Amino acid sequence: MKYVGLMDCNNFFVSCERLFRPDLQNKPTLVLSSNDGCVVARSQEIKDMGIPMGVPYFKVKDIIKDSKTAVFSSNFSLYRDLSARVYDSLSEQVPTVEQYSIDESFFYLNADSNTDVEREALSIKNKIERQTGIPVSIGVASNKTLAKLASKFAKKDKGVFVLDTEKLQKLALEVPLYDIWGIGINLNKSLQSNNIANVADYLALDVAVVRKLYGVVGERLWLELSGKLINKVCRKKTIKQSITHSRSFNKAIFTKSVIEDALSYHTRMAAEDLRSVNLVATGVKIFIMPSRHGDYVLQGLSANIIFDTPTDDTFAMLDNINKVLNGIYKASVPYKKAGITLFGLIDKSSLQNKLFNNTVDKNILLNTLDNLNKKFGKDFIKIGDRQKSKMWQTKADKLSPAYTTRWSDIPIVSA
């Protein structure tokens, strides 16, 4: 019998920080968003204190002051690297894995009974934790929707939960519909207005009524909650449509050269991401935005550039971007955000190189730069970084070391 599993890393960002700080186990720990603005990850201890997700940090400073809470800025280099390790560990154990997010993956399991599949899922969980140090939970059911729900029960259980028809019937009255994967705010409001509050209420409807009221999306959801396999686990990754790299400034920026440095950084990062998945871009959009509050809210501008040839060349992108910035920058506007979007992405292998160009030599150079940055730390070697200004950079006063991606940050173990 084929089952669908969902592997979910527990409090992922917090678990990543604790991996190299074992002294923080069972201690209140939280992670902040860009510019150290809001709470984006909480340990169980923080949740038990009643601190919600997304709350501005300044609102909870006094609450956590006496609890000796560990506070971290988001360390995305660390989180991405550990996410890849978790994914690799799971992929070694099952044939088909679909990464759904940085901390979640769907996969298939074959077993003769619920007892066997529970045993297999527990084995997978234990191996991932041994290999990576990241605690995970696994929900197992007949499809993605129910596996997602099962993973929530797994966190409260022993880390693995198999949700079959019998268990769902017992739990259906207890599970509110806003807890179900695929039910957004608008759909939930519509359901509530029709006095449909939980899974039992929803399944009590005739499927024809569901289709009439909530369309194809509602019908598929009803079928999956009924145990049907509608959304299959897909191992093949779809080609990205675009890659965006942007960041809000810590304070308003007026100086053009500082904005150029910010755009250069975002271009380097986006181009590196592009090369890592063997894609090229047909164009790039650059944007510079003022604060959403104040007199300059309508002064944000953007511009699109179509490359002569689809490219992943950082040098070519920088040449175009710096020229276009002159046309949209206004010295009187206080800018709060800048970024780029690479669009029209295609597989690099499908690109026929023009004759008599230096593509091969440029690829060797770019690959060398990528390898050096991977070895010594992101942006170790910078292209197009002239001013050395830090004015535009995101506030990250509580950033932990890049333990796994920068040689200088590797922890030293003393005997």
Image: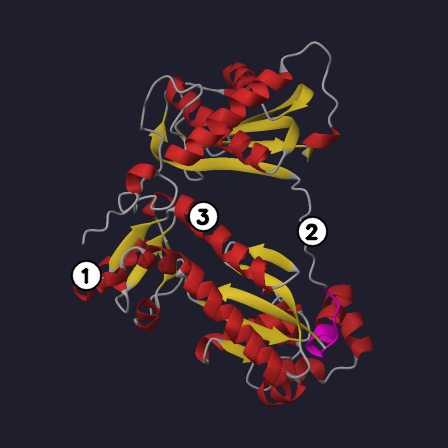
Badge number at residue 236 = 2
Badge number at residue 81 = 3
Q: Quadrant of residue 7?
A: bottom right
Q: Outermost residue toward the top?
A: 356
Q: Residues within 10 Å of mark 2 (few under 14, many from 20)?
A: few
Give coordinates of residue 124: x percent, y percent.
53, 69
Q: Residues within 10 Å of mark 3 (few under 14, many from 20)?
A: some
Q: Residue at x 42, y 46 (%)?
A: 76
Give coordinates of residue 338: x percent, y percent.
46, 31
Q: Viewed as shown, does residue 207 lie left or right of 5?
A: right
Q: Residue at x 58, y 86 (%)?
A: 171
- The magenta segment: 222-231
Q: Nearer the viewer, mark 1 or mark 2?
A: 2
Give coordinates of residue 213: x percent, y percent.
76, 71
Residue 223 counted in the magenta span: yes
**Residue, disc 1:** 65
The secondary structure that most of the magenta stretch takes on is loop
Is there a contact, CB below 8 Å, between mark 1 and mark 3?
Answer: no
Residue 90 counted in the magenta span: no
